[in-house]
Amino acid sequence: MDNNKRPDSMARITTKEQADAFIAEQVQQIKAQVGDKKVLLALSGGVDSSVVAALLIKAIGKQLVCVHVNHGLMRKGESEQVIEVFKNQLDANLIYIDATDRFLDLLKGVSEPEKKRKIIGGEFIKVFDEEAKKLEGISFLAQGTIYPDILESDGVKAHHNVGGLPEEMKFELVEPVKLLFKDEVRVVGKALGLPVSMVERQPFPGPGLGVRCLGAITRDRLNALREADAILREEFDKCGLNTKVWQYFIAVPDLKSVGVKDSKRYEGWPAIIRAVNTTDAMSATIEEIPYDVLKRITARITAEVEGINRVLYDLTPKPVGTIEWE
Ligand code: XMP
C-alpha cells in the first residue's frame, strides 16, 4: 500500500467524534513507531506543526523535543503564545530560541525580496541544525506535512517555506497528519484542546513579517509594522471581521512622506492594509470593510504607532496584485 495515498474509504473528518477517533488511532500508531525513542519537531506556531506537537505530546509526552525558533519576524504575541500553550499548559519539552539578532543582523541592508527569503530560510535551517546537534539520542523527526503538500509537492509550500531541513539530517519521519486536509487538521486541533486562535490561524509566510516589511528591514520599521498589524487584528476581532476575512495584515513600504503630528512636521511611513478573501490563494477578492471600521483603524494606528503617519487600504484584487507585497 502507498503510505502517501489517502484511501478512498477514508471519511472526511468534520466532527469532534471523528477527530477523537483519529487521535486515538494516531496515538497508538505513534507509540508503536517511536517506542521509547526521542522525536524532534520544529514548532513554528502554525496550525500544522502545532497540531502535530499536541498529538505527539499526547502519545509520547516528554519524548518529544519541540524547538521553536523566533526569527524576530513573528506577528505580535505569537512566540509568546507558543510558549504559553506548549510549555505552560501542555508541559511540553520545549526549547525556545530567540534568534532575532542573528536574523536581523544578516538582513541588514538587504532589499531584494528573493535574497531576503533565502537568508531567512537558510538561517532558519542553520539555527535548527545547531540545536539538533546539541541534543542526544534523537531518532525521529516529526513534521507537519499535510495532504495538499503531498499532492502538490512542488507547490507553494515546498519552495517557499523555511521549514525545509538539511539533507544530512537522516532521521526517520513521523508525519501523523500527512493524509489530512487543512480543515481536518483544524478539527483535530480543536479536539486536542488547542486554542481557537492557534487552530484558526491565518496562512503566514515562512519568512514572516520579513515579506511585509518591504525593502531592507530596519528594527524601527519592523516594530511599527508589528504594532500596526496588532491593532488591525484587534479591531477585526472586535467587529467580527476576523471570522469573515480569509487573510488580513499590514505591509509597510520603505518610503516616508511628510505629515503633521502635535502641530509639528512628522515624517513617517504609510501602513498598508490588506484584507482578502479566497479559497485557494490563486486568486483573491477584496473585503468591503465598513468605513467606520477603516476610520477607527486609521485613527488608532496613526495615534498609537511610532513612525506611521498614514494608513492606506489596498483595493487591488489578485490578479493583478499578489496577496503579499513581496
Ligand atoms: P501571494 O503573495 O503569492 O500569496 O499571492 C499567496 C498565499 O501564499 C502565502 N505565502 C506564503 N506561504 N511561505 C508560505 O508558506 C511563503 O514564503 C509565502 N509567501 C506567500 C501568502 O500569505 C498567501 O496566503
Image (cartoon, rainbow, N blue to C red):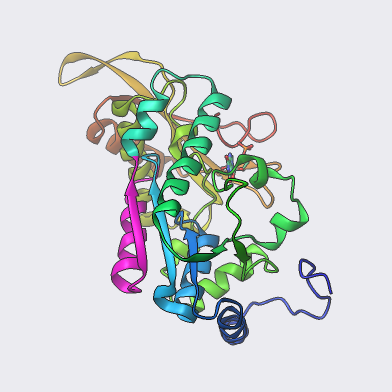
Magenta segment: does it hold 135?
Answer: no
Q: Position of residue 210 (x, y in %)?
A: 45, 33
Q: Residue at x 69, y 55 (%)?
A: 149
Q: Position of residue 148 (x, y in %)?
A: 71, 57
Q: Quadrant of the C terminus?
A: top right
For residue 280, say whether it is visible: yes
Q: Is residue 112 above or below residue 305?
A: above
Q: Quadrant of the N terminus?
A: bottom right
- Side of 11 relative to 33 (left or right): right
Q: Is residue 94 above or below residue 281?
A: below
Q: Residue at x 44, y 23 (%)?
A: 253
Query: Which residues fall within the magenta stretch?
Result: 74-99
Magenta segment: does it hold 78?
Answer: yes
Give the total of numbered labels.
0
Q: Which quadrant of the picture is home to ligand 1?
A: top right
Q: Residue 9 versus residue 117: which sits nearer the camera? A: 117
Q: Position of residue 244 (x, y in %)?
A: 53, 56
- Side of 8 relative to 198 (left or right): right
Which residue occupies the extreme front position in the image? 137
- Side of 29 relative to 224 (left or right): right
Q: Is residue 189 above or below residue 82?
A: below
> Quarter-wise, where is residue 240 in the image?
bottom left
